[in-house]
Image (spheres, grey):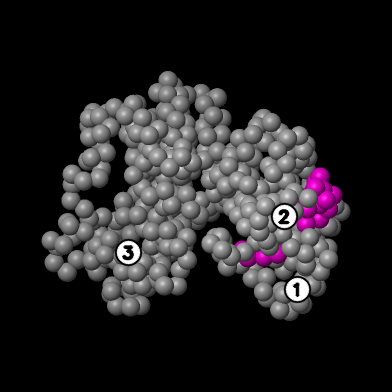
Amino acid sequence: MNHLAMTAKAFLLDSPTATSSELNEHLQGMALSFLTEQVQDYWHGLEVDHLGDAAADLKTLAQGELNADQQAHIVKALEVLKAAQARVNEGHGSELLAVLSSMTSSNGNATEILRDDQGDRPTESMQDRHKENALCWGELSSTYQAEHAVNLKPASQRDIASAHKTLSRFVKEINWKTHTRAEVSAVRDAMRASGLADSTVNKLLAKLCAVMNWASQNGYVPHDYTKGLKVKGVESKRRAFSAVELDKVVETIADEREISKRLFGTIAIVTGARAGELTQLTKADVVNEAGHLCIDINANNGKTLKTKASARVVPLINGAYGLDLTEFTEHVEALPADDSLVFGMSRDVGSKWFNESVLPKALPDRTGDLVLHSLRHTMATMLKQSECAESVAQDVLGHSAQSITFGRYGKAKAVDQMADGLSRALLGVRLI
């Protein structure tokens, strides 16, 4: 809930005249959320490289024309992001507690703020129980999640729970049995006013709409006024690397001494796979199909995928952007067991290495629209420029169920098609 969209950058840009007290209050809210919520609620399904991206954005912003309070806000915001990352990596919140304790406000010290936030006021459900015939968000959300849990993977359940928890901050006073269009519209406006990015607001509205559509169809509410409220014109801030930028990234990765990191970076480039998909790969997931060495991205043995369509087999193209399949094969064969991780690191570590080590060296003047995930945009661009069939490109990137392609053409032919498309994209064309 309070990831990139709730960083100090968004708050500063949206509130350029904010007072020192308001800036401090915003940071306290961020730190409290990172400290008190279950770790999985924040970090599962969230590309952890967003934190590195957020930190880079803040450092860039600090070079602009800001007053002393705003510069202090950026410094403290970077401390909050670093402390939040430490909670994920090390399993405790000591750094967040230290940062929170260093903040003071007119409402008292950090311990008092934390106590007030968690237990010294009635909850939404306690308040609404005193309202005759009221249906509060907490009750509606819990019923929805309980009914859908049987058909959802744990990761999806956590993502929904996290989104619903965020929504609860903005819908506390609404009785959903009698809700109005104006009330729901006000929820959207409140989310935008709080500093959430429009893309995040739209995602939360989609979750709200799903609940209310279900509630209306199943008789929990008499009507649904949540449709058609998304903010229009929202575009992704991510972009593909240019040819020059990508060449510099490739050169920097080639200088990496650790073979696992070097191979991780190179295969991220030549497959467009997500960081989490690559860092979950095991020795057993490196396979041969139709004469091609491939990586098998799957949900076996507890691994998680973003969607069902994310499961796919992607051929590796020897020589593409420095990929040496002999080196890669020897590295994989040296792993002790079939369940050994190919790259030996978590998604967090892999993303942090790329965003905080590779990118600053390769592109010291880069902007915040380039991160590890930008390599997926780059692969999509290269496939399009090489005139690769859209269906094959979707198979490579995991945007459609590969079982359809395999069923239509047979696995061997489908892998051949992907290998041909990737070869032309990676070896035959250059980005503009």
In space, the residues marked 1 and 3 are separated at their CA atoms by 42 Å
The image shows residue 148 at horizontal and vertical percentages of 40, 71
**Callout 3 environment at 10 Å: few (<14), some (14 to 19), or many (20+)?**
many
Looking at the picture, tell me which residue is in the foreground, 331 or 347.
Answer: 331
Q: Does the rendering let one see residue 216?
A: yes
Q: CA distance from mark 1 to mark 2?
A: 18 Å
For label 1, the SS is helix
The image shows residue 70 at horizontal and vertical percentages of 43, 26
**Residue highlighted by disc 1:** 411
Kind of residue indicated by mark 1: Lys
Mark number, residue 141:
3
Q: Which residue shows up at 73% across the image and 79% down it?
A: 408
Q: Residue at x 81, y 63 (%)?
A: 292
Residue 160 position in % (x across, y down): 41, 60
Q: On residue 85, which mark appears?
A: none
| Residue depth check, mark 1 versus mark 3: number of the one nearer the observer | 1
Query: In the figure, residue 93 lies in which quadrant?
Result: top left
Magenta residue span: 310-329
| In the image, residue 126 above or below residue 151 | above
Mark earlier in primary sequence (3, 2): 3
Question: Within the image, what quadrant is residue 368 found in?
Answer: top right
Direction from residue 308 to residue 24 in the image, left or right: left
Pointer 1 or 2: first along the chain: 2
Residue 15 or residue 296, whichever sits in front = 296
Q: Is residue 250 magenta?
A: no
Q: Is residue 7 left or right of residue 136?
A: right
Q: Amino acid at mark 2?
A: Thr
Q: Is residue 158 above or below residue 99?
A: below
The residue identified by callout 2 is 271
Question: Is 142 on the left-hand or right-hand side of 411?
Answer: left
Residue in view at x 36 percent, y 30 percent: 98
Question: Do tag 3 and tag 2 residues touch (Cβ < 8 Å)?
Answer: no
